Image (tube, rainbow, N blue to C red):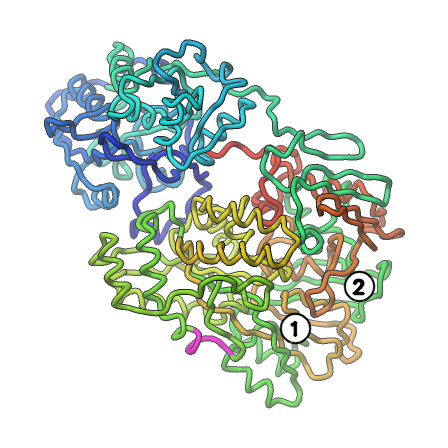
Amino acid sequence: MKQFKLISLLVVVVMLLGALAACGTPATPAAQPTAAPAQPAAATEAPKPTEAPQPTAVPAEAAKKFNVATNAEFAPMEFVDQEKNLTGFDIELIKAIAADQKFEIEFQNVAWDGIFAGLEAGQYDAIISSVTIREDRQKLYDFSDPYFNANQAIVVVADNADITDGASLAGKRVGTQIETTGAFAVRDLGVDPKQYDGPDLALQDLVNGNLDAVVVDTPVAAQYALLADQFKGKLKIASELQTNETYGLTVQKGDPKGILPLFNAGLATVKASGEYDKLYEKYMGIKPGAVAAEAPAEGGNQAVVTDTSYAAVNCDYGGLLKSIEALDDLTVKFTLCRSDVAFPSKVAFSAFPINSSEYLEATSGGGDALISNPIGTGPYKLEKWQKGDSVIMTRNDDYWGEKANAKTLVFRWQKEGAARLLELQSGTVDGIDNPSPDDFETIKNDSNLTLYPREALNIFYLGFNRDYPPFDNEKVRQALAIGLDRARIVDNFYPEGSIVASHFTPCSIPGGCEGEEWYEYDLEAAKALLAEAGFPDGFEVDLSFRDVVRGYLPEPALVAQDIQAQLKDLGITVNIVVMESGAFLDASDRGDLPMYLLGWGADYPDQTNFLDYHFGDGSSDQFGAQFDDLTAILTEAASLADPDGRNKLYAEANNLIKKHVPMVPVAHGGSGTAFKADVTGAHASPLGNETFAVMDAGGRDIFVWMQNAEPIGLYCADETDGESLRACEQINEPLMAYEVGGTAVQPGLAESYEVSDDLTEWTFKLREGVKFHDGSDLDAKDVIMSYAVQWDAAHPLHKGREGSFAYFSGLLGQFLNAPPAE
């Protein structure tokens, strides 16, 4: 329920998968409670409060005294009453447990922002403050048995006798806070809720007679219904919906003071005696266990599958796709839930490869066979991936298009720019990616080499996850936006062709630089804003990155160190955390990193590729909870075909990005490739998708390419790493393609397409005679299967390497059958 305090111990932690939920946060107990931001979800499922085991521990023989911290700003769980006494459900519960187990308690009422750091420093022995038990927290702390299930309460007016459980919400007008756990729980019951910015607004509409019920976190519901002056006596909690967000007593790892066995035994006794039920009813206004049945298995978001189609029942699930159907063996029709002018550019992207349906089934949609041994239709086929050394590909002599020039294509890697250049100069490789900034002139002055500059269609940014304090404070994020000297970074560490970013999207992308430009550097103003936010002395934070060169980040370690030094001037202590590339990308996508260095290279030249992927509906959790005002504008802009109309909306979107500061855009990085002078067909693609089939290494049979890092996986439906995608692009192909060395969309595996006037029906005609590397024929079934395994989270082949399929959700919206957010 409450947010996790950012601490220095995170330097050594790579967090486990932790779903992020939009639930209510602690609100100050007052006559007018305030709405709360998104929250992390529980990682464990606990029994209902009445289903408790009998006590097994023996009470302490001699009285012990424990110092217990709480943040008394979350009524009715913990708060200070009108007599200035510390009270609430948590407080009375642990007092009852202490009485049973014969230990004493001294409470400390501390700020939530430092509560976990205080526990680590030994300032108190335990925390009882509605702390959600989550997998990432269990890596850092030990928890008691769950003592509270924070389900979703169904709130009705006091005299309503019709609504008694979840089933009785059918056909009713139900309100929720925007895209919270409550909203998802209501949808699972087949009800489309009316959504509000905060629970107080929804509850006021309920009192005014405009709603029949409101669904919100049980503690939040109890706070409003029982404590808030404007609602007291007018509302009641009729029932709950099971969501299993559980709270636990929190102690240091290893429980050095031995409080957990006592707490667990006392909790069991208090439950068995009925005292727990009395406390629950006192503070929640409802008996524990009054939980409605879960939604039936047949929900409203299930896939409808036939021999020739894959479809959603309707578009309520929130994604872009409505159906994919085979009109014949070589014709596939996509029907969208809304217009999408960029759809051809999206289906040309390498994260949407067409795989053999038989091979997907044979590999169960994942495992080493699919990830390390792809079977595609491209100009090269995989011969061998020698992990840690090279990827070796051979020419596909049965390729449907123009055959590759070199018989063998070898990918090697080296993270050091100087070492890559040395290999090129010595003749052991034919081309390299991303020469170091200092080496541009050396290459230009060497008659045996040729430099190919790459247009800066990318963005490097300093990212924040606003689910982690202090980045949940917008003023803190704005202070860092103003207090970072971005020009200093570009001047010192970037090559020619690089510019300081005025907007997140490069200006060469249509609509990219609409709206206000980014903040000017002002250190003193940043310090003042940081103090205004409550951090006059700064704070401590981890800065995570991967030490892999990218066009948007040519000197990652040096840039990290410079940012560390710059933020020190703001009083912020930065701990640099270097992570393995794959682990870093997975962790950032899951939302595990509070502050990090990341960037983006264009996959296709449209705002949807930059803004929608990062900030739109279905985007990854790297920035924490979405900004609903921004998401709504991006969804509207993506559905327009009129450039002027889109640009007006993108101006609004860019202004909101500047206001919210989910990240600080630093640079559009100039980069390039370098080749031996005798290589013909060499180029640097602005999309980073160089096509090696068109290159001739001076008549040599073997073409050797050296890039910055090893591919992470070669099933690129489930990869976002540029090194992986570039290798995949030689082996696998999507429906459409980008021109060699350019950005225009052209035919790929589909030789043509037709589109309806409203841009919602896209019909692709496949080429005849295309074969996969195993000799099987390409047909419409392969297209449907390739998309369906990404689209449907419940599909048995929705596995991949890590299972995130981040590009699909980022570019095509929500997954079908995605588990409800918690």
Q: Quadrant of the C terminus?
A: top left
Of callouts 2 and 1, the N-terminal one = 2
- Residue placed farthest to the right in the image? 769
Q: Residues within 10 Å of mark 1 (few under 14, many from 20)?
A: many
| Along the viewing direction, whichever of 494 and 322 lies nearer the viewer | 322
Q: Quadrant of the N terminus?
A: top left
Query: Magenta region's main secondary structure?
Result: helix
Question: Mark 1 sits on what residue?
Answer: 684
Q: Which mark is residue 28?
A: none
User: What distance separates the C-alpha of mark 2 from that of mark 1?
Assistant: 22 Å
Residue at 43%, 37% (x, y): give it. 21
Question: Mark 2 sits on what residue?
Answer: 395
| Along the viewing direction, whichever of 420 and 558 lies nearer the viewer | 558
Residue type at mark 2: give it. Arg
Horizontal side, residue 639 vs residue 38: left or right: right
Residue at 56%, 44% (x, y): give it. 804
Q: From the top left corner, tell me how far across and down residue 777 is, in percent.
A: 85, 47
Residue at 43%, 34% (x, y): give it. 196
Against 82, is 16 above or below? below
Q: From the top left corner, tell me how far across and down residue 652 is, in percent.
A: 48, 55
Residue 705 image-quadrant placement: bottom right
* Image mark count: 2
Residue type at mark 1: give it. Ala
